[in-house]
Structures are given as structure tokens and as C-alpha cells.
Image (cartoon, helix red, strand yellow):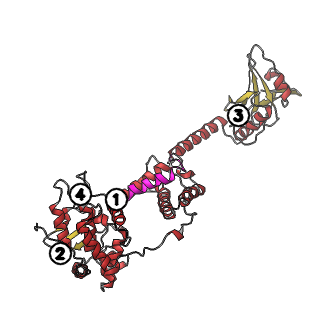
Amino acid sequence: MLYYVAGGLVLFCYISLSLATTSPVTATVTLGYGNALTQGHAMTTKALTEREVKGAKPKDNKYELIDSSRERGAGRLVIAVYPSGAKVFSFKYQIDSKRQYVQLGRYPSMTLAQAREISQPLAGMLKQGLDPKIEIEKEQAKEKAAQQVEAKKGSLGQLFEGYTQQMKVDGKRTFKAVLHALEAEVYPIVKPETKAKDVSVDDIKLILGRIIRRGAAVQSNRIRSYLSAAFNYGLKHDNDPAKMGCDVLFGIGFNPVLAIPKQTAAESVGENYLTFDETRELLAILETREGFRMGFHVAKLIQLCFYTGGQRPYELAACRWDAINWNEATLEIIADVSKNKRAHLLPLVESAITILEQLYAERDPLNPFIFPHKFDHSQHMRLDSLSQSLCRYREARPDAKHFVARDIRRTCKTLMGALGISKDIRDRLQNHALNDVSSKHYDRYSYLPEKRIALEAWEAKLNEVEQGNVVSLRPCHAK
């Protein structure tokens, strides 16, 4: 407290403390009046100078120099001088008749001007009737809470893991391939520990640009699609009631992929399909597999895809033996296997039954799948075996029309149309998702008789003897 004697009264100064902040501040002094006799001594109040602070000498006991601004109720900036010679700035104030200090910093690391700047918001709190120390504690608690929230913000790696796990929960069979593709294409540019919320549009441009420069524009579009879906997942994650209490929050403010255009020139609608003659030739060659290496089960999978009207190879490969009703001549592709998550009852024509009987004769008694994995009794055949076998077929027969696994489905759809089979029945045979209101919500008819009639007409056309190629499918013993 500083005192100044005037007319028998002493002018005294109350020092107030305040929160140290980064905003500009200046020191202030609160003035009051009291009796000089009762105060006991008098001192002149004035603003300190840098020279006075620098020249203050240590004494046997600690003492304070007080910086006065002659402002009432705003506390005081003081500098304590210790016997050791150390000088420490503090904000001194009185509240509820108790003297309080908030330490600001050591001189000369902190200058007098800096100390004044820091003390100003503390003085402002005091004038508003707030206790600076309590306000400091509140700010520290808020900062700690904010740091804890920030620490919970998920990384890019956690975003990819969460998104692909959600794909798995939703029954998307490509979740492993999507995760592998994201890891391979993204992590060389943006590290997995990067906060997902910090990934920028420029980061996405670098990722996709690197793929495009190596001549893989189609792959860049796929990665763009995966990234966009992953960030959409992250945007919804934090507000999903089902995720309440989750240890990971992403804090993503926007989807950085949406600003990046798709490489439209790289995408083209598939046009390739086999003719009837080319299809018959392929089916005949698959019986002998002379001149190229292709496993028995792969060859039968391709044949079965054709004789079932172009079913998705994965959906057939993932079927179990108990999905077949031999008496009714049907195969059910269950909802968990089906791409559109609807069970698909498929009629089996004679040629398809013959293929299944051949497979049954070679079945693995420990494996429940029609197309078993070669080594793992609990899994079905991997679909990369199909792609590799078709590559070997094309290499061995360079003069044959080039085709890939996806062309099988297009071939069946196109040639069945040429036979006069309606688009509606062809769509139902291939289990396309029908999104009209009637099909989606009301029509639960299986169309099994109509599908069987269509497949029998298709089978008859495929098994016509032309150009000396005969598809010979000898039936084995029935079950």
C-alpha cells in the first residue's frame, strides 16, 4: 500500500491482481483516503520507471516497489526485490479484506512495459467485482478442457479404420480392399497420425495428383470416392447418438474432397461383351483348359456365372451348399451375400445343375462353400484367383477377344436382351436394386417362374451347336 499525506489525510493505494493474458494491458492504481495518523507512515505514489526498476538494490529483507496509475479499485503492479537480487513482477490486490498476489514474471526477462500490459486485464476484472485468481483458475480449467477435447480429435488413420469398420458392419464386402487402397495411396502424402480435421483441400490435390501423374486416372477417381465417403462418415460421427461416449471425436468442419473435381475423361461406360459364338467357344474351352493354367473351381465359377444369367462372381463364390434346393432346382443368394442386401432366389437350369453336381463330386467335406478356399476350410475361394486365371487365358489366346470378369455380366444382359427377354426380367435375374416405390416397398413376388422360363431360353441358345463347338457337361449322380 502506498501513502501520500495531504491535509491531515493520507492517500492510500490498494493493489489489485488480474489474469495474465496476451491482450495489451497497462498497470493501474486504486486511490483511497484515510487518516495519516492511523496509517502510521507516508510514501509518495508515482509511476515507476525502467531506470528505477533496474537500479533497485537488494536489502536484508524483501521489499516492493509499487507502480501507481492513481486509479481507484484497480489493484497495483509491484516488483518485489529479494535479498538475492532477484526481481519479480506481481499484480497485488485486496479483496474481501485479504491481500492477494498474482505473479507475472521475472525482471529483466519481463520488462516494466510488458508487466504493465499483462496486468491491465487483471485490473479490469477487479473493477468488475471479479477475483482475478478465481478467473485465472476458470480460464485454466477451460483451457485444460479444450486441450482434452483436442487430444480426443481423431487421426486420419482412425478415420479410415472407423469408416471401413462401418462398411463391414453395413455388410460391404470391399471394406478390406478400400482400407488397403487408402493406406497405400494416402499415407505417402499425409501421415496416418495427422488429425483428420487438419487435412486440407491441398492435401487431397497432392494425393490424387500423384495417382494421375502415374497414368492411373481411374484409380484417382476411386480414391477420391473413398476419401469423400470417409470424411462424410467423420462429419456424421461426432453427432451420431449411437456414438455418444466414444473416446474419439474427429471435429471435422467440412469435407475437403468435395472441392476436387472427378476426372470425368477417365471414366467410360463399359461397352465390351462377347457374342454368342465367342461365348460358346469360351464355355467349351473351359471344359478342357488346354494351353493355359486355370483351376477346376475357377472354370466352373465362370461357367456357372453364364448359366445363371450373369450373376456376380462373388455372390456365387460365397454361396454354401445348403443354399441349394436340389428338389426345387433353386439356389438362394442370401441377403448377407447379396450386394443390395436382398435375398435372391435363382432358378437352376439343367446345365447349371450339372455344373453344381460336378463341383459336389469334388467338394471339400470340411468346407461348407460351393467354391472352397484351397487352404482355409472356413473360407470361400478368393476372387483374385478368377482375375489371375483370366489373365493367363488371355495371354495363352492372344487372338481371342479380350474380356475381363465384369464383361461376363454385361454379355449375359446384352445377349439375353437380343433373345427378347424383357429388361425387367433381366434386371430381376441379375438382382439389380429396383428403386421404384412398388418394387422397393410392396412387390415381394419372387418372379421365379418367369425367371426360369428366361433362363431356359438362354440355356438353349448357349447350348446350340455351332462352328463345331459343343459344350459337353456330363451330369454326375444326383444328390
Residue linked to disc 1: 384
What percent of the width, then of the height, locates residue 320? 22, 61
User: Mark 4 packing: few (<14 Cα in 10 Å), some, or many (20+)?
Assistant: many
Of the two numbered discs 3 and 2 in the rendering, the one whose residue sits closer to the viewer = 2
Secondary structure type for disc 3: loop
Residue linked to disc 2: 350
Secondary structure type for disc 2: helix
Calculate the distance from the C-alpha at mark 2 to the C-alpha at mark 1: 28 Å
Residue 184 covered by magenta stretch: yes
- The magenta-colored residue range is 174-192
- Identity of the amino acid at label 4? Pro
Residue farthest to the bottom, as pictured: 420
Calculate the distance from the C-alpha at mark 3 to the C-alpha at mark 4: 78 Å
Q: Is residue 332 above or below residue 238?
A: below
- Identity of the amino acid at label 2? Glu
Q: Is residue 283 above or below residue 194?
A: below
What percent of the width, then of the height, locates residue 318? 27, 61
Residue at horizontal 54 percent and vertical 50 percent from the top: 190
Residue 11 falls in which quadrant of the image?
top right
Secondary structure type for disc 1: helix
User: Mark 2 packing: few (<14 Cα in 10 Å), some, or many (20+)?
Assistant: some
Residue linked to disc 3: 17
Calculate the distance from the C-alpha at mark 3 to the C-alpha at mark 2: 94 Å
Q: Nearer the viewer, residue 386 or 37?
A: 386
Residue 372 circle label: 4
Mark toward the start of the polypeptide (4 vs 2): 2
Q: Nearer the viewer, residue 3 or 163?
A: 163
